[in-house]
Image: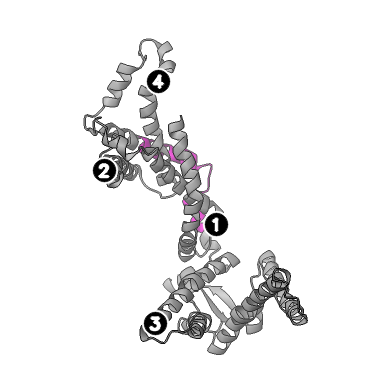
Amino acid sequence: MSAYLIPIKTAALVFPFLALLLALPFMIVQYRRYGSFIFWRAVVLYTFVFYLITAYFLITLPLPSIASVAKLTTPRYNLVPFMALRTFLNTTVFSPLHPGTWLAALKQPGFIQPAFNLLLTVPFGVYLRYYFKRSVPQVLVMTFGLSLFFELTQLSGLYGIYPRPYRLFDVDDLIINTTGGVLGGLIAPALMRAFPSRDEMDAKSRARGSQVTWLRRFVAFLVDNLLGVWLIGAVLELIATLLGVRSALGDVIVTRVLAPVFIFVVYPLVRRGATPGKALVRIRIVQEDGAPVGFGRLLWREFLLYGVAQYSVFGFMQLFNEIFVKFHRTEVNFALLGLFGLVAAFIVLNFLWEMVTRDNHYFYDVWAKTKQVSTIETDAQTKV
């Protein structure tokens, strides 16, 4: 039993990190395709990822030492089909004419190993039919491909890490795994009645696609800042280095002024109010009356957000550190802490209030007389 528990525990440890790594790309795809993110779709897809990780670890773990594998003299592969059936009949107490032996046979290794291989791919077939809407013949082909990948992983000695296979490449595993996937595909329709269908999830996602939620805006914010501003800043700094004109002041101007202005003002001015991140999640900035936003409003809006708001919060945190950690308790520091604290408190309260009310019309949009709209509905109307 420990041979099965170790891979499952390992998958449980790895999955949270992998989920974080996949979170941003996953959300981008969902907002790009549907304009919204629904919880149940996330549950389905993330459990599918967890299942695949677990299945992979089950066929590779625990990992032996390279030295012990080098000493192995066991067969590398079995190409004779139905050896598992012969092993079951020859090594268990099973007798078709004696029902009393049936239950005991199910507890013996000759049955447990093939049964494990069968159950390993049943969830794969269920997911393929339920969410990916594949037919049974497609499930058969795709499960065979997954099983073949597993077997080749074992045959290659984990892609050449080991001098030889430490687990047997077995044609019976291909047959049993594929059968398990098909079985999962066949029972999926009965299970699907208990959960929302893929069509229902898609319809619900598209119905919400016209709403510009805070999470959707936050995904755009991450893309713009983590990829857009950072990438442009890195390119400009590289150019300055090659030209031999790089300096500390220049780096500050590039990363704090030029890159943000390009991403949040120049680019959306050309792209009808969409920054790179907003374009990915299909939203754009417009005036309150729906007219295209101009340079002045964009500059004012981004100054309020990335100038006033951002540096007020940073300033408050820095002064708090100076006063209560470094004990630089001057009157000027206390006055500035109070000033920045008032602005930071207003910003935090505004964000919390808009998140609770779901209005998502933050102070910088109100003062710049702008709003963010979804392009999902516009795109759909254009296609019609």
Of the numbered discs in the image, which one, if any, rests on residue 156? 2
Pick the residue in front: 129 or 382.
129
The residue lying toward the viewer, choosing from 279 and 157, is 157
Q: Which residues are magenta?
A: 180-204
User: Mark 4 and mark 1: span between their CA atoms?
Assistant: 44 Å
1 or 2: mark nearer the eye: 2
Residue bearing mark 3 = 241
Q: Earlier in the sequence, mark 3 or mark 1?
A: 1
Q: Earlier in the sequence, mark 4 or mark 3?
A: 4
Separation of residues labelled 3 and 1 (CA atoms): 45 Å
Among the 4 quarters of the image, the one containing residue 289: bottom right
Up the image or down, 380 lies above or below 182; here it is below
Please say if 83 is above or below 268. above
**Badge 1: residue crowd in 10 Å (few <14, some 14–19, many ≥20):** some
* Label annotation for residue 38: 1
Q: Main secondary structure of the magenta part?
A: helix
CA–CA distance in space, label 1 to label 2: 40 Å
Q: Marks 4 and 3, Cα distance to the nearest angstrom?
A: 69 Å
Q: Earlier in the sequence, mark 4 or mark 2?
A: 4
Q: Which residue is mark 4?
A: 108
Residue 232 x %, y %? 44, 78
Local secondary structure at mark 3 = helix
Mark 3 belongs to which amino acid? Answer: Thr
Q: Quadrant of residue 358?
A: bottom right
Q: Amino acid at mark 1?
A: Ile
Where in the figure is residue 71, as x and y percent of width and height? 26, 33
Magenta segment: does it hold 162? Answer: no
- In front: mark 3 or mark 2? 3
Q: CA distance from mark 3 to mark 2?
A: 46 Å
